[in-house]
Image: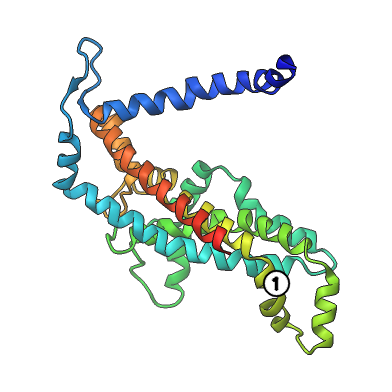
């Protein structure tokens, strides 16, 4: 009997060991380093300094700028990635000839590497890029400094995140739409709820769990955005597109200020944890 009870844990043991070595142990170590002064020097041990790194955050102007940029990223990206893919999913859920080709076309950006996508979009955004050449046809002779203007850089990167994520979230919504019984729409049509009205009466209420899921996933992804920033702007110009994760990367791997980077990472972890708790509380109420 005891052997039977231990069997599930034996199956879990290899995965738990792997997670312990690659996730849990580094996380605990990073948490402890947040309260030390440690630059990457193998000859010196970390020095305990208590809450000094957190006090340093309070006066770090760049850190608060990255917080602002990250929140702006959330506000600019998440609503679009929650709403727009749902409309795409409704469109590609129609029983039309060749609809699979449209599904493939919308999903193609998802399978493209972010490095390739970032390089391609950066080329489009250059002063002599295809986008500015197109705008010149409408009389904008000088073109637009998409990635070099502090007021435009972050928004230009957001476009890439949205373009890359539309197809992914569309597939999530598509799975939910195909789980809705067609009889519900037929009954709604009898009651006079047809065309787009049926989606308001039936689709949206039944898709609420999927909407919540997409909202949380897209919010966490927007909070952790890094590749687009690294490839296209590297946080510039004048920190206008620098996010929390990119700032963490700079402090850890460029400045080798490991303990301060762990402090920033801890704040980021608490922020993501807060988003997850809010989602759990909101979804449990619904």
- Residue 98: which quarter of the image? bottom right
Q: Residues within 10 Å of mark 1 (few under 14, many from 20)?
A: some
**Residue sitting at the far bottom:** 192
Element under disc 1:
helix
Q: In the rendered view, would you say 156 is above or below 204? A: above
Between 106 and 147, the one nearer to me in the picture: 106
Direction top: furthest residue: 43
Asked whether residue 2 is in view, the answer is yes
The residue sitting at 45% across, 56% down in the picture is 278
**Where, quadrant-wise, is the C terminus in this rendering?**
bottom right
Residue 33: percent from left, percent from top: 27, 26
How far across and down, in percent of the image, does residue 153 sit? 34, 58
Q: How is the image coloured?
A: rainbow
Quadrant in which the N terminus appears: top right
Point out residue 18 in the picture as x, y percentages from the top left corner: 55, 21
Left or right, 70 with reference to 195? left
Q: Residue furthest front?
A: 1
Which residue sits at x=71%, y=19%?
Answer: 7
Mark count: 1
Residue occupying image coordinates x 69% and y 79%: 201
151 or 47: nearer the viewer: 47
Residue in the picture at 28% in, 34% down: 261
From the image, tell me which residue sits under label 1.
203
Q: Nearer the viewer, residue 70 or 9?
A: 9
* Image spot of residue 93 (x, y percent): 76, 66
């Amino acid at each position: 009997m005891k052997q039977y009870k231990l069997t599930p844990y034996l199956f879990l043991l290899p995965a738990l060991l792997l997670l312990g070595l690659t996730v849990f142990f580094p996380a605990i170590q990073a948490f402890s380093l947040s309260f030390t002064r440690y630059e990457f020097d193998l000859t010196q041990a970390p020095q305990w300094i208590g809450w000094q790194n957190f006090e340093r955050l309070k006066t770090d102007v760049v850190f608060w700028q990255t917080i602002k940029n990250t929140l702006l990223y959330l506000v600019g990206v998440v609503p679009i990635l929650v709403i727009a893919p749902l409309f795409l999913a409704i469109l590609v859920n129609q029983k039309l000839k060749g609809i699979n080709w449209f599904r493939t076309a919308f999903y193609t950006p998802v399978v493209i590497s972010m490095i390739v996508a970032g390089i391609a979009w950066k080329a489009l955004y250059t002063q002599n890029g295809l986008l500015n050449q197109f705008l010149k046809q409408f009389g904008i002779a000088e073109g637009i400094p998409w990635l070099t203007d502090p007021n435009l850089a972050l928004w230009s990167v957001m476009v890439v995140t949205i373009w890359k994520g539309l197809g992914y979230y569309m597939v999530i919504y598509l799975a939910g739409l195909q789980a809705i019984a067609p009889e519900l729409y037929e009954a709604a049509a009898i009651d006079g709820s047809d065309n787009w009205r049926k989606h308001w009466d039936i689709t949206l209420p039944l898709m609420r769990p999927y909407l919540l899921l997409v909202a949380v996933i897209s919010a966490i992804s927007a909070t952790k955005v890094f590749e687009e920033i690294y490839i296209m702007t590297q946080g510039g110009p004048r920190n206008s597109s620098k996010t929390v994760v990119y700032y963490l990367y700079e402090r850890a791997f460029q400045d080798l200020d490991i303990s301060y980077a762990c402090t920033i990472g801890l704040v980021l972890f608490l922020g993501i944890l807060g988003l997850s708790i809010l989602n759990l509380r909101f979804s449990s109420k619904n």
